[in-house]
Amino acid sequence: MTGVIVTTINLTAIYALVALGISLTWSGLGFLNLSTGAMYAGAAYGAWLVATNISSNVVVVLLGGVIVGAALGALICLTVFLPLDGKPNWELRTLTATLALSFVGTNIYLWQFGPQFKQFDPLFDFIREFRIGETLVQPSKTGTVIATGILIAIILAFISYSRIGLGVRALTQSVEGAALVGINRRTTAFAILGVSGAFIGLAAVLLGQIYFVEPNSGYSPMIKGLIVALLGGLGSLRGAVIAAFLVAFAEAVTLQYLGGSWVLITLFVLIAVVLIIRPRGIAGVLEGTRA
């Protein structure tokens, strides 16, 4: 059982990062970003280039992924959100535009890096292995939890205490109310998409230690992130974290006792049960606001 607990904590950290990026964008902007997979792959390639050409130091590589992810978020704000915001059928247009951008990004990565898999060297080898019961906790899992905790703490402090963060929180509560007190939605969108990209960039580096990096490597994390965000209640940040834990626990138990071929079936059953009971997602139990 200790193996299930360790795997659950590790997967919760990674799934929460992607789901938080998706949920923050929706709660603040009403914008579902289907180019998340391309952002993930781009941040992973960016971090790999940093590790290969600049430094393999863990802090430098992690910052490389976070910065590239944030930059890609700002690029999506410039190329998709700002031109389409407020236009007729803008929700459908942004969905279509981000999906198209995802395909464009994948082909750019294929042209630039080729189909060959890239791999990160171990980033957390300086952390010692230790045991919890009969389970050996590897350095990559310990480092994943620590790095995730640090980034989330920094982002939460930024959102809680900075002026830009105040605008982000106001938008997640009420777009109309934020406009009445002079908060510019279009300006704040850069911060929201940048923070979203930073979350996804860190997830890309952390998963890059386990899975190879290739042009299509972002699609599976995007699907898992969407599952978690929908299960938690799209737009709810607290719901996304709780849903990440539930999805990670279901996956860890399934892997331990049934095998990997049953994981998707288990997740679909979990989603069906939760959404039948709470159509708004887990957040429907906890809160009435969007975030």
Image: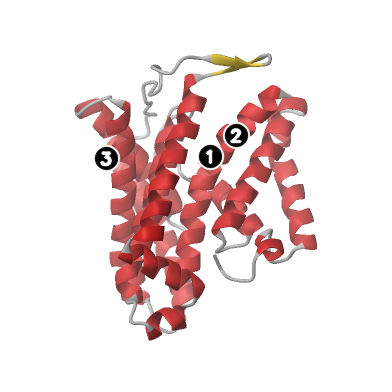
Secondary element under disc 2, as helix, strand or loop, is helix
- The image shows residue 202, relative to residue 271, as above or below, that is above
Classed neighbour count for the residue bearing mark 3: other residues with Cα under 10 Å, few (<14), some (14–19), many (≥20)? few
Residue 132 placement: quadrant: top right
Q: Amino acid at mark 3?
A: Gln
Circles 2 and 1, Cβ within 8 Å, touching? The answer is yes
Depth check, front residue: 15 or 93: 15
Q: Secondary structure at mark 1?
A: helix
Q: Is residue 143 visible?
A: yes
Q: Is residue 119 above or below residue 86?
A: above
Give the x, y percent position of residue 164: 32, 65
Say whether marks 2 and 3 touch (CB < 8 Å): no
Of the numbered discs 2 and 3, the one sitting upstream in the chain is: 2
Give how far across and how far down residue 63 sits, in percent.
30, 38
Residue designated by label 1: 13
Split into 4 quadrants, where in the image is the C terminus?
Answer: bottom right
* Other residues around mark 1 within 10 Å, as few (<14) / some (14–19) / many (≥20): many
Q: Which residue matches tag 2?
A: 9
Are the two marked residues, 1 and 3, in contact with CB atoms closer than 8 angstroms? no
> Which is more toward the observer, 215 or 146?
146
Labels 1, 3: front one: 1
- Count of all numbered marks drawn on residues in the image: 3
Residue 175: x and y in percent read 45, 78
Q: Is 145 left, or right, of 60 in this rendering?
A: right
CA gap, disc 1 and disc 3: 30 Å
Rounded to the nearest whole Å, what is the CA distance between mark 2 and mark 1? 6 Å
The residue at which mark 3 appears reads as 112
Under mark 2, the amino acid is Ile
Q: Amino acid at mark 1?
A: Ala
